[in-house]
Image (cartoon, rainbow, N blue to C red):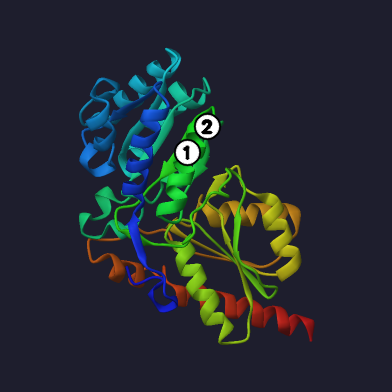
């Protein structure tokens, strides 16, 4: 992955791998955890849980709606089910079951959407989850988490194990740059993490785009612009305090996500800004389009999910703000 290389970020494990490792560890600590998968355990990495706990692992085949139904039944029986498949399959195919069998009864089911975003590359648009965050956020009672790297994914998985209630965790296929080089023990659901401070503009990202925001902040420093960088790993519940402070302190916000612009992180941040402290907001993401099959780095470049795009949006906002002040 090219993102982050310019500022010395090293690639870590794919977030799906980090999730799989954390889930297996939790299996040894929490005997009530059970796992349901849609015949893609070797991709979602729930296979590692299955190796240690075959009696607590259930593969229902390529049948996501049934997968969610089984998970909800296990939750009603007092278990702690984790249900995993590709993000596009489990959120799009099984949305009605998620709505009526998990969200409505407010059950303690954790949904894992792997292979999210366009960075899965050659698998193509039929398997790229780009609507999943919007769908998950639309479900009442759901907590929605999009971690930035290997350490934060492990921390998020552990946090969700302690959280009682329905939740969605988004993971990816490629190696993600390591943002949290010293671990992420300070991870808290619903609390953004400030990775870099600044008073000229705020960059808010999640997932792979957190590293892109850090790289953009470095590029902006070349223009003598100090950018604050927030890892907004939890899209729901959103950290409105951090957003309000950022709007008040910096006067402009750029969001970045590997997701459709409508209904994702940018939309949630803009809604919060409009309610709490109105300032200009620009959003980097997929603009009402599907992607195609291709090399992950080339796809991110083609669809404008880059540090350069974030930098350009921030430059325009800062210039606009400065012009309005003269």
Give the image quarter of residue 250. Answer: bottom right
Name above or below for residue 274 compared with residue 220. above
Query: Is residue 226 visible from the viewing direction of this image?
Result: yes
Instruction: Please give left or right for residue 23 compared with residue 61 in the image.
Output: right
Query: Is residue 273 visible from the viewing direction of this image?
Result: no
Give the image quarter of residue 287. Answer: bottom left
Name above or below for residue 30 compared with residue 188. above
Count how many numbered circles sit on residues in the image: 2
Residue in view at x 48 percent, y 25 percent: 108
Q: Residue 232 or 175: which is nearer the viewer?
A: 175
Asked if the residue at tag 2 contacts the one at tag 1, i.e. Cβ–Cβ closer than 8 Å, the answer is yes
Q: Residue under circle 1?
A: 158
Spot occupied by residue 168 in the image (x, y as percentages of width and height): 45, 38
Name above or below for residue 139 compared with residue 208. above
Instruction: Please give left or right for residue 318 compared with residue 144 in the image.
Output: right
Residue in view at x 36 percent, y 26 percent: 68
Residue in view at x 73 percent, y 52 percent: 275
Q: Which mark is residue 162?
A: 2
Q: Residue 228 or 235: which is nearer the viewer?
A: 228
Q: Secondary structure at mark 2?
A: helix
Q: Residue 156 or 301: which is nearer the viewer?
A: 156
* Dot 2 crowding, Cα within 10 Å, few <14, some 14–19, many 20+: few
Spot occupied by residue 197 in the image (x, y as percentages of width and height): 65, 69
* Dot 1 crowding, Cα within 10 Å, few <14, some 14–19, many 20+: some
């Amino acid at each position: 992955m090219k993102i982050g290389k310019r500022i010395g970020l090293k690639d870590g494990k794919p977030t799906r791998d980090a999730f799989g490792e954390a889930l297996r560890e939790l299996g040894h600590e929490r005997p009530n955890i059970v796992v349901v998968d849609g015949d893609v355990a070797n991709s979602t990495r729930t296979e590692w849980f299955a190796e240690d706990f075959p009696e607590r692992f259930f593969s229902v085949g390529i049948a996501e709606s049934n997968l969610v139904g089984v998970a909800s039944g296990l939750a009603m029986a007092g278990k702690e089910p984790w249900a995993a498949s590709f993000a596009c399959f489990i959120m799009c195919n099984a949305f009605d079951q998620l709505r009526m069998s998990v969200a409505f009864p407010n059950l303690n089911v954790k949904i894992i959407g792997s292979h999210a975003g366009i960075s899965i590359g050659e698998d193509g648009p039929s398997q790229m989850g780009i609507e999943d965050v919007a769908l998950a956020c639309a479900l009442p009672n759901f907590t929605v988490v999009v971690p930035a790297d290997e350490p934060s994914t492990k921390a998020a998985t552990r946090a969700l194990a302690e959280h009682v209630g329905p939740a969605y965790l988004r993971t990816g296929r490629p190696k993600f740059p390591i943002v949290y080089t010293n671990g992420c023990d300070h991870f808290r659901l619903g609390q953004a993490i400030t990775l870099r401070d600044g008073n000229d503009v705020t960059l808010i990202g999640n997932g792979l785009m957190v590293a892109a925001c850090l790289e953009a902040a470095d590029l902006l420093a070349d223009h003598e612009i100090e950018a604050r960088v927030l890892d907004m790993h939890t899209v729901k519940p959103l950290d409105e305090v951090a957003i309000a402070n950022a709007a008040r302190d910096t006067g402009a916000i750029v969001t970045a996500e590997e997701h459709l612009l409508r209904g994702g992180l940018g939309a949630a941040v803009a809604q919060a800004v409009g309610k709490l402290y109105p300032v200009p907001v620009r959003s980097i993401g997929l603009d009402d389009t599907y992607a195609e099959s291709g090399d992950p780095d080339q796809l991110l470049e083609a669809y404008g999910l880059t540090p350069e795009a974030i930098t350009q949006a921030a430059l325009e906002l800062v210039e606009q703000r400065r012009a309005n002040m003269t």
